Image: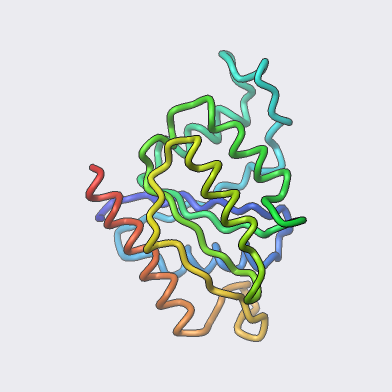
């Protein structure tokens, strides 16, 4: 687990979305010796076109695939729009299908939606990650709704229980990554 890297992928383009709040909190609660890295290039990715999924790849796609390749595990936090993944995040995932960077990579998600919501995004994420060959770590996939009253001025969740559950999910994800290595 020491020197491991978890790549944090947000499915939201909104700077202060609940998904971004959760991933900022993940940076805060990452286990000692673990480097959590937020991917920030979602808005820069071109629309997926299979004709462009060849060398030379567009620079933003090369950056995405390199970030995934360098990570030991992926932690995703995405909203649900119209019962599925937001188009921009599905676009990110589409760009990963043609590469092999996600293949067997331990992957999990945190669902921050209110109770009764977000299931469509989870189901679609499971399906698409299956196409990429990701190793979904079910025990690291958690539902942690964000209560804005528990978010400090830095945009980080302060609730000790939420922080502990997020840290435990990250530990489970890293344990799976260690077992893969």
User: Relative to residue 107, is residue 150 depicted above or below?
Assistant: below
> For residue 70, which quarter of the picture?
top left
From the viewer's side, name the closer residue of 77 and 137: 137
Q: Position of residue 149 (x, y in %)?
A: 66, 86
Question: What residue is drawn where x is 55% and y is 27%?
Answer: 62
Q: Is residue 162 left or right of residue 82?
A: left
Q: Look at the image and tell me in which quarter the C terminus lies.
A: top left
Q: Position of residue 76 (x, y in %)?
A: 53, 54
User: Relative to residue 153, is residue 61 depicted above or below?
Assistant: above
User: Relative to residue 42, is residue 13 depicted above or below?
Assistant: below
Q: Is residue 105 left or right of residue 125?
A: left
Question: What residue is drawn where x is 43% and y is 55%?
Answer: 36
Q: Position of residue 58 (x, y in %)?
A: 64, 23
Q: Is residue 72 left or right of residue 45?
A: left
Question: What residue is drawn where x is 67% and y is 15%?
Answer: 51
Question: What residue is drawn where x is 30% and y is 59%?
Answer: 33
């Amino acid at each position: 687990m020491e020197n491991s890297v978890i790549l944090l992928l947000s499915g939201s383009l909104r700077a202060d979305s609940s998904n971004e709040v959760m991933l900022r909190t993940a940076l805060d609660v990452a286990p000692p010796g673990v480097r959590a890295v937020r991917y920030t290039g979602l808005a820069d990715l071109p629309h997926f076109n299979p004709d462009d999924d060849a060398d030379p790849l567009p620079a933003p796609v090369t950056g995405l695939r390199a970030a995934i390749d360098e990570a030991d595990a992926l932690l995703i936090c995405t909203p649900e729009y119209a019962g599925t993944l937001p188009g921009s995040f599905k676009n990110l995932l589409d760009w990963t299908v043609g590469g092999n960077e996600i293949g067997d990579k331990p992957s999990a998600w945190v669902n921050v939606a209110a109770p009764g919501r977000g299931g469509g995004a989870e189901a679609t994420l499971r399906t698409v990650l299956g196409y990429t060959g990701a190793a979904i770590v079910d025990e690291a996939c958690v539902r942690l709704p964000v209560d804005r009253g528990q978010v400090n001025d830095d945009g980080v969740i302060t609730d000790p229980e939420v922080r502990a559950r997020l840290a435990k999910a990250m530990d489970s994800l890293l344990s799976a990554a260690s077992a893969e290595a």
